[in-house]
Amino acid sequence: MFVELINLVIMISGRGSNMKAILESIRKGEIDGIDNILVISNKPDALGLVIAEREYGVKTTTVLSNKNDESFESRLNNELKKYNIYPHNGLICLAGFMKILSPSFVELYKHRIMNVHPSLLPSFKGLHAQKQALLAGVKISGCTVHFVDNGVDSGPIILQYPVPVYYNDDELSLSERILVKEHETYVRAIKLFALKQISVVKNRVVQTQVI
Ligand code: GAR
């Protein structure tokens, strides 16, 4: 069966551990259907940039962002086009990318932008999701990979994975336990997308074939 290849963009702002998990999985040949890979950071000193270049030999670029910077997305778009990334062939994966994309950009790449979040959405959106879970006293938290819509940490849910919260957890221990599952879950979601095995029906993600 011929599957049209996608150009994968991973957008980061920091250490890039989710990015690394994705790149590692691609290197091991575990994700089919990917052509080019580009890592974009909005921070020039993001550790993930170094990991992508030195450990994985992946192309990287920085599109600087400042608060209320209206030119960010036109610069981002120019950069994407430079690497032959368009809405018909691109998949943009936000991996610790700490900037909110505008509704017009999200519409342009509708259901082609994914995000990972360290909670079972719609609970605990925004910053410090793990701390929010601890403060709420939940016994189960987890992670979510979803398509991005115009809200913060919202949009059709692709996959979720539950993680227990222990009585002696602090923010760090819970974050570490969730992070392991973020890595696995993000890779699974990208696999599904790359193999064209998911679609969105009435705001819900439908899996057409289980892998
Ligand atoms: C991850 O825990 C990710 O879920 C979170 O930022 C961290 C980035 O880590 N994202 C959000 O909270 C999005 N709202 P990483 O740079 O090591 O992948």
Image (spheres, rainbow, N blue to C red):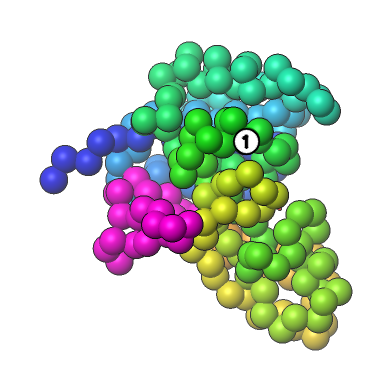
Residue in the foreground of this view, choosing between 76 and 130: 76
Which residue is most to the front?
202
Residue in the foreground of this view, choosing between 124 and 161: 124
Please give the name of the residue rendered at 44% of the width and 58% of the height, measured from the top-left corner.
Answer: 202
Give yes or no for residue 206 being in the magenta stretch.
yes
**Above-or-below relation of 154 to 56:** below
> Residue 23: x, y in percent?
48, 42
Locate residue 121: give its quadrant. bottom right
Give yes or no for residue 30 being in the magenta stretch.
no
Please give the name of the residue rendered at 66% of the width and 53% of the height, measured from the top-left corner.
Answer: 153
Rate crowding at label 1 as few (under 14), some (14 to 19) or many (20 or more) other CA atoms within 10 Å: some
**Above-or-below relation of 67 to 140:** above
Where are the magenta residues, as a range? 185-211
Q: Is residue 179 visible?
A: yes
**On the image, numbered disc 1 is attached to which residue?**
103
Please give the name of the residue rendered at 29% of the width and 35% of the height, measured from the top-left corner.
Answer: 5
Left/right of residue 185 with respect to residue 88 in the rendered view: right
> Residue 211: x, y in percent?
31, 64
Q: Residue flagged by tag 1: what amino acid is it? A: Pro
Which residue is most to the right?
135
**Above-or-below relation of 44 to 143:** above
> Residue 22: x, y in percent?
49, 47
> Residue 20: x, y in percent?
55, 45
Locate residue 139: give its quadrant. bottom right
